Image (spheres, rainbow, N blue to C red):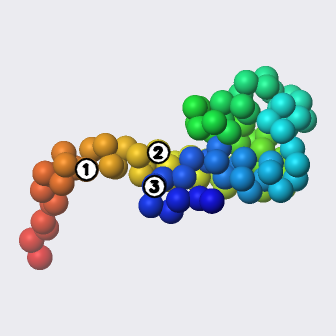
Amino acid sequence: MLNLDTPIHPGEILRQEYLAPLGLKPYTLAKKLHVPRTRIERLTHKATPVTLDTALRLAKFFGTTPQFWMNMQASYDLAVQGRAEQAEIAEIEQLKVAG
């Protein structure tokens, strides 16, 4: 089950929402996408991000869009980085425009 309190890596979505219901293994998906087995295995283990190339291939195979995969990656990256830099970002004073 996905924990909504923490950022969700696209590899977890791929594993739980696509591979598991379809009974696909990372190796099988890698063969169908014409990529190294390790690329999909590392993605599903949250060890690597979705790349542009991978997003294009996943979109074609699953009938989604590359933006779907890249938006998930960008959302994940922003959440992780935002948490890491939360204190420093909080110290930045917002621009106030006189008006």
51 in relation to 59, above or below: above
Q: Residue at 37% across / 44% down in the picture?
A: 81
Give the CA separation, mark 2 to mark 1. Answer: 14 Å
User: What label does residue 86 carry, if any?
Assistant: 1
Q: Residue at 80% across / 51% down in the picture?
A: 20
Marks 1 & 3, CB-CB < 8 Å contact: no
Earlier along the polypeptide chain: callout 3 or callout 2?
3
Q: Residue at 50% across / 62% down in the picture?
A: 4
Earlier along the polypeptide chain: callout 1 or callout 3?
3
10 Å crowding of disc 2: few (<14), some (14-19), many (20+): some
Earlier along the polypeptide chain: callout 2 or callout 1?
2
What secondary structure is marked by label 2? helix
Give the labeled residue for mark 3: 6
Question: Between 19 and 32, which is closer to the camera in this rendering?
Answer: 19
Q: Residue furthest left?
A: 98
What secondary structure is marked by label 3? loop
Marks 2 & 1, CB-CB < 8 Å contact: no
- The image position of residue 34, as x and y in percent, is 86, 28
Q: Residue furthest front?
A: 1
Give the CA separation, mark 3 to mark 2. Answer: 12 Å
Q: Residue at 63% across / 59% down in the picture?
A: 1
- The image position of residue 86, as x and y in percent, is 25, 50
